[in-house]
Amino acid sequence: MIYASTTDDQCSVVVRKNLCGHNCSSTRRKKQVKNATKFWICEKVKDFIIDNATLKAKALQKKIKERYKVHIHYQKVYMGRILALSQLYGDWDKSFDNLYRFKAQIESCSSSSIVNIDHHIINGKIRFRKMLFALKPCLDGFLNGCRPYLAVDSTLLTGRFRRQLASASAVDGHNWLYPVCFGIFDSETNENWKWFMTQLREAIGSPRGLAIHTDAGQPVMTAVNEVFPLAEKRECMFHLVNNFKKQYSRKTTTNGQVEPKKKSCKKLDGRVLPHIIKKLNEESRELSLEVQECSEEVAEVTSLGGSGFRFVVNLQERTCSCRKWQVCGIPCKHAIAFITSLSNASIEDYVDQYYSIDKFRTTYQQLIPAMPGKT
């Protein structure tokens, strides 16, 4: 026989007397709940993982305790998390079986896109080594609308299988990063980087004036020199300074995306992108410079206010001895001073074509095609 009564909140019942004994589990008597299975945990943590897939078991353990007022062993939470990730995003091992289906689907939805997969055979089984994929709209957008500049780098993938995610990115007229291609390989070796750069060259060729920007790592620099011998090479200043500090140990004194940009193109009017016009207008104000014309196309521009530095501007060649105009393709303040001193001259006429609205529209002219899910 059991005697019980309701509490003051009229929602809970308290057992006052139990003559039959009590042998069920109780969260009040035990610090950990043993009868919570990984399947139960899986269902409870799915919402947390959907919001943030990077949450680890320790964080999920804390969230379960906050929401359900129970403490569950770390190992059970870990297994429940693995099961939830598998149900939400697929199994790690089985995902490799879908690579060639992924390749076929991309080639079906976007003809002329490139998906190259490299594998080897171990004990009669096909094992993944590396891959590269480049979508046709991205390749065309880079070749026809972006400056001939590529930033090449890789980052560590921290999932179950540690790999390197490599990428080659360009810059559009708004100075937004523009994806060209991606690759995956096991580590940053000379062989892997040479394979990646070779696939990249087959995709884009060797555009005139191409500049390739790297992190100054020896394997990637070696590959760039071998595969793109005529390209101009540049090193990331952040990595260059860090490598210098390591060596000398001294102190030293950084479609969800395409569609909105495509829509913004329709609203643009004129010849040059608005943010470039705004930048030029800002720089044209309060110019403390003196212009002395040597001819209709050449002038000496002198800084006022004490420094007295003199720069030579050539409008026909679009150069300035400060070299800023040549580097970025936008008239420097010395060129602006010369241009604004002329009658019937427009600064917009001296901005490089890669900052034009036409080039920007060309960059995002093609949409990345939609792909169906796995069936």
Image (cartoon, grey):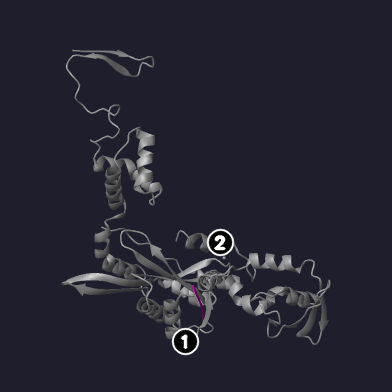
| Residue 369 seen | no
The residue located at (49%, 87%) in the rendering is 230
The answer to whether one can see residue 59 in this image is yes
Q: Is residue 238 magenta?
A: no
Q: Which residue is mark 1?
A: 229
Residue type (three-letter) at the residue carrying disc 2: Ser
The image shows residue 350 at horizontal and vertical percentages of 68, 77
Q: Amino acid at mark 1?
A: Pro
Left/right of residue 229 with respect to residue 327 in the rendered view: left
Q: Which residues are magenta?
A: 210-215
Mark 1, secondary structure of its residue: loop
Q: Is residue 66 above or below residue 160?
A: above
Number of disc labels: 2
Tell which circle, 2 or 1, labels the residue nearer the N-terminal end.
1
Place of residue 40 in the rendered image (x, y in percent of width and height, measured from the top left):
26, 40
Q: Residue furthest front?
A: 249
Q: What percent of the width, then of the height, locates residue 136?
A: 41, 73
The picture quadrant where one finds residue 89 is bottom left
- Mark 2 residue element: helix
> Badge 2 is on which residue?
264
* Residue at screen point 68% across, 66% down: 279
